[in-house]
Image: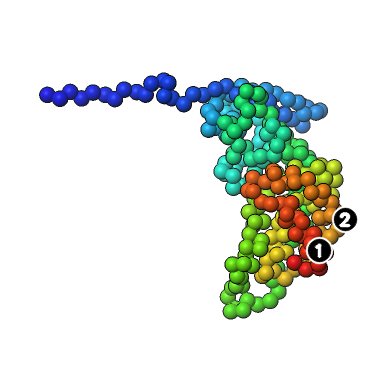
């Protein structure tokens, strides 16, 4: 008679090991702090955890007052942009194993925008610049067939890269010009203007080019490539800005 035997549980050595990581977070509570301060937390994590997971563990298990933005947690909404070890990144896309865990992980709010609390900044100046470049399709003519505005594959490819923007502000808040000049439109606004300037279906490219030809427009860009390096979607931001400059010089896209 056969005897059933239970399977042995996997040996402890086969389990994925966890480790303790120190996060040093720049905290600020406007009700009690005159200036931001640094606070460290030790968190038990796995290499495949993300910085966002670490922040959740701190908030849920150690300090419920820790404040940060997040929504989709999958790199689509762009709400959890922050500075991680001195670089603008999305917390939901930054894996712990891709950082040097032998050293503390420094986390702080993005720069250049008013700090509200902990890792949360006031995004209104950013969206004000975004709105000013008129980032929406403006077509005066009637579609050829009366139903849709037909566009070739080549025409669509002309602005494909800049359609990827998720308005996380990582590019704009990594720009040293934006840090020192709050009037500069910033890379994200220019990217979103580019998306419509080079859209063959749009009839208001000249209006946007005139807006960006302002002294606080594209000519404030110093081509440091910080914006391109910070973009979590891989948009060639500096190239898009250069293309807008060229269009201004030509007087047309």
Please give the name of the residue rendered at 72% of the width and 34% of the height, measured from the top-left corner: 86
Q: Residue furthest right?
A: 215
Please give the name of the residue rendered at 63% of the width and 76% of the height, measured from the top-left corner: 143
Q: Is residue 4 left or right of residue 11?
A: left
Please give the name of the residue rendered at 78% of the width and 64% of the height, measured from the top-left corner: 247
Disc 1 crowd rating (10 Å Cα; few below 14, some 14-19, many 20+) is some
- Give above or below for 120 relative to 60: below
Task: Report which residue position mark 2 lands on.
Answer: 215
Quadrant, the C terminus = bottom right
Q: Which badge, 2 or 1, comes first in the chain's sequence?
A: 2
- Give above or below for 122 relative to 160: above
Quadrant, the N terminus = top left
- Give above or below for 164 relative to 206: above
Instruction: Choose top left, top right, bottom left or bottom right for residue 250.
Output: bottom right
Disc number for residue 184 = none
Q: Position of residue 164 (x, y in %)?
A: 63, 54
Q: Position of residue 33 (x, y in %)?
A: 78, 27
> Toward the viewer: 192 or 39?
192
């Amino acid at each position: 008679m056969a005897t059933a035997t239970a399977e042995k549980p996997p040996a402890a050595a086969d389990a994925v090991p966890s480790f303790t990581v120190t996060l040093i977070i720049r905290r600020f509570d406007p009700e009690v702090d005159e200036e931001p301060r640094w606070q460290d937390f030790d968190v038990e994590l796995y290499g495949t955890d993300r910085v966002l997971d670490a922040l959740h563990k701190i908030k849920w298990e150690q300090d419920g007052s820790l404040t940060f933005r997040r929504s989709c947690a999958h790199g689509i909404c762009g709400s959890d942009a922050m500075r991680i070890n001195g670089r603008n990144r999305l917390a939901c896309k930054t894996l712990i194993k891709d950082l040097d865990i032998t050293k503390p992980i420094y986390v702080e709010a993005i720069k250049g925008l008013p700090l509200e609390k902990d890792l949360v900044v006031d995004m209104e100046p950013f969206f004000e610049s975004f709105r000013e470049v008129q980032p929406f399709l403006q077509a005066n003519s009637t579609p050829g067939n009366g139903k849709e505005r037909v566009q070739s594959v080549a025409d669509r490819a002309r602005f494909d890269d800049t359609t990827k923007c998720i308005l996380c502000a990582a590019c704009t808040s990594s720009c040293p010009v934006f840090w020192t000049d709050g009037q500069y439109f910033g890379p994200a606004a220019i990217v979103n203007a580019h998306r419509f300037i080079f859209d063959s279906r749009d009839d208001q490219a000249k209006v946007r080019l005139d807006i960006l030809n302002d002294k606080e427009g594209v000519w404030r860009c110093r081509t440091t490539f910080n914006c391109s390096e910070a973009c979590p979607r891989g948009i060639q931001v500096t190239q898009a800005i250069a293309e807008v400059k060229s269009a201004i010089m030509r007087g047309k896209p």
